[in-house]
Amino acid sequence: MPLAKNLSRVPVTIDADACIADKGCTVCVDVCPLDVLVIADDKSTAYMKYDECWYCLPCETDCPKNAVKVEIPYLLS
Amino acid sequence: MNDENTAAEILEVDVLVIGGGTAGPMAAVKAKEKNPKLKVALLEKANVKRSGCISMGMDGLNNAVIPGHATPEQYVKEITIANDGIVNQKTIMAYATRSYDMINQLDEWGVKFEKDETGDYNVKKVHHMGTYVLPMPEGHHMKKILYRQLRKKRVQVINRFMATRLFTGKEGRIAGAHLVNPRTAETAVIKAKTIILCTGAAGRLGMPTSGYLFGTYENPTNAGDGYSMAYHAGAELSGLECYQINPLIKDYNGPACAYVTGPMGGYTANAQGDRFIECDYWSGQMMLEFFKELEGGRGPVFLKIDHLADETIEEIEEILHSNERPSRGRFHERRNTNYREKMVEMHISEIGFCSGHSASGIWTDENARTTIPGLYAAGDCGSVPHNYMLGAFVYGAIAGEDAVDYCAQYEHSDINPDDITKEQTRVLAPTKVKDGIPPEQMEYKLRRLVNDYLQPPKVTKKMEIGRERFAEIRKDLEKLQASDPHELMRAMEVHFILDCAEMAAVSSMYRTESRWGLYHYRVDYPQTDDNEWFCHVQTMKGEDGLPTCKKRKIEPYILDLDDTEKNAYNKLRIEKELIEA
């Protein structure tokens, strides 16, 4: 494979203990304009899969459990 | 909707609105209000609840034409001058005459505007000549209010499907759109009598100086989709050489909001804390002065509010940190920038297309009609200059209502099945490539080249080299590899961005003069040449499949300008000697 895996520190983090993805909540995933959040395969939590963030905050604002935290992406913080 | 192994499922509607941000919901609602029997669908790449550049609301109206504060005539003149005369005044007048009704409509729907003690709108002065800025301190509810109307009027909402191309049929009339789902890679086709493009700016054209691809001025989901789709459908685009470049908070890349802080006493200053422009209203001329100060010995440029009273700064923080780009507060916090103690460092944005702030768009007349029968454009991707959010609402309404009349006259056009197969093959190609190039890498290279070769000051030879590099990337498109449906969306966006980059280069090279201050500052053609170039530059797809340009005459003005008014935007710089004198 001529492709590398580059690591990237993502700006959106989700508190897995507070996240209620296991109860079927998908609010943060639904509201993201860039579709960068997903629910983990085991439904335990949402997480940021793609580092493509506009730091616009609907995910954090609309989360019913205050489980989402958005930082300014490191490159421009 | 089906996968690639079966014929694409075809949904049929009367009016298809593409893009659920600002203009789109309004277009859909107004079409339904006018004829509730029509099937009206609103298609959105994300989710209409939080999509578009007002996903977190807006802090005010920049161009409110309210009786007692401004007249439509005055506004038409102001924008004619701010856009160096290259306007179709009828389109601006159509906006200006409906501006007040739209504000009242939004007010009725529950949008909270700033009012004085008697209940009148509290309009502020920011523009050079007239008074048009109406704050919305609680504007963060905007998307919820629009969503409520969509539900109430029974608009069919289709989230998480992106349009990739438009289809035309009999007599070149619009026939439908091809879609792909960014989560499943399902493809689909929607047949429609009319389509209204409300896809926003081309916000991922240039690269922000931070190098973070998604740290753009515009919502980065707006990759120029509508510009590219209109182009491939054969529509004329206009004023693409009049780029969008905006002043912003450096690195954060969001607006510093001189429109919010200006009326409260804030202003744009150089490193010495001095004003250098008379007026903070965004125009190409203002941006050129901004650029000169940024690059000059008294630079860089700052937003100065550290001289204001504590309660005023608190009010500014309350607005700026809860509306439009609310993460501004945490950006300043990490940088230890307290508005009370420090000026905020500013910079200029990457280039883009956007009629909301400048004048680059899909050519539309005063009815929001493009040059393709049945195809409309509204909002940032239309061509009505300096249109901002309120203009997007007004032109969304105009498009929605006119589309209803169009539907009464025409039946659906048939789509050639070969066109569908061809598009489906193009869209799904990146899913079949092995050991190819990831979309992110191709996008990075493409947008870095846009910065290197297209960013003003514009130089002919650089733009020629840019076109050569873009042609190389076009050959690379077949190597685009998408490892999942999300990457497939990004791969399709690379196609959009490349089309926009080529159009930006071709239109900029065609207009051999300088105009609109920094937006079209050509170093090798520094003069404005009204004899040759007092016209629109239209860009469209040529017979060789590449962009080509032609001139389009300016429609006779409906309002003549006085000689004293004509230069109002050319004398923005404050000379230090004058201040001291």
Image (cartoon, coloured by chain):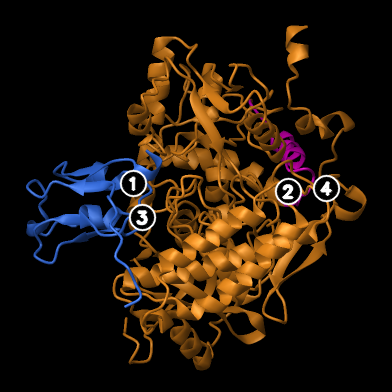
Q: Which one of the lettered chains is coloured blue? A: A
Q: Residue A52 carries which label?
A: 3
N-terminal-most mark, 4 or 1: 1
Three-letter residue code for mark 4 = Tyr
Q: Where is residue B425 in the image (x, y as percent from the top left)?
A: 45, 87
Kindly indicate the quadrant of the structure image that contains residue B507.
Answer: bottom right
Q: Disc 2 sits on a residue from what chain? A: B
Residue tagged 2: B520
Which tag is nearer the camera, tag 2 or tag 4? Answer: 2
Q: Disc 1 sits on a residue from what chain? A: B
Residue tagged 4: B557
Q: Which one of the lettered chains is coloured orange? A: B
Circle 2 Cα neighbour tier, 10 Å, few/some/many (<14 / 14–19 / ≥20): many
The verdict on residue B71 being magenta is yes
In the rendered image, residues at marks 3 and 4 fall on the same chain: no
Q: Are marks 2 and 4 in contact (CB under 8 Å)?
A: no
Viewed as shown, does residue B81 lie left or right of B478? right
Quadrant assignment for the N terminus of chain B: bottom left
Kindly report the distance in space between the C-alpha atoms of the residues bearing marks 2 and 3.
30 Å
Q: Is mark 1 on a helix, strand or loop?
A: helix
Residue at 73% across, 15% down: B576
Kindly report the distance in space between the C-alpha atoms of the residues bearing marks 4 and 1.
39 Å
Most extreme residue toward the top, as rendered?
B581
Q: Disc 4 sits on a residue from what chain? A: B
Q: Can residue B400 be seen from the camera position used here?
A: no
Circle 3 Cα neighbour tier, 10 Å, few/some/many (<14 / 14–19 / ≥20): many
Vertically, is A58 above or below B61? below
Q: What stretch is highlighted in magenta?
A: B69-90
N-terminal-most mark, 2 or 4: 2
N-terminal-most mark, 2 or 1: 1
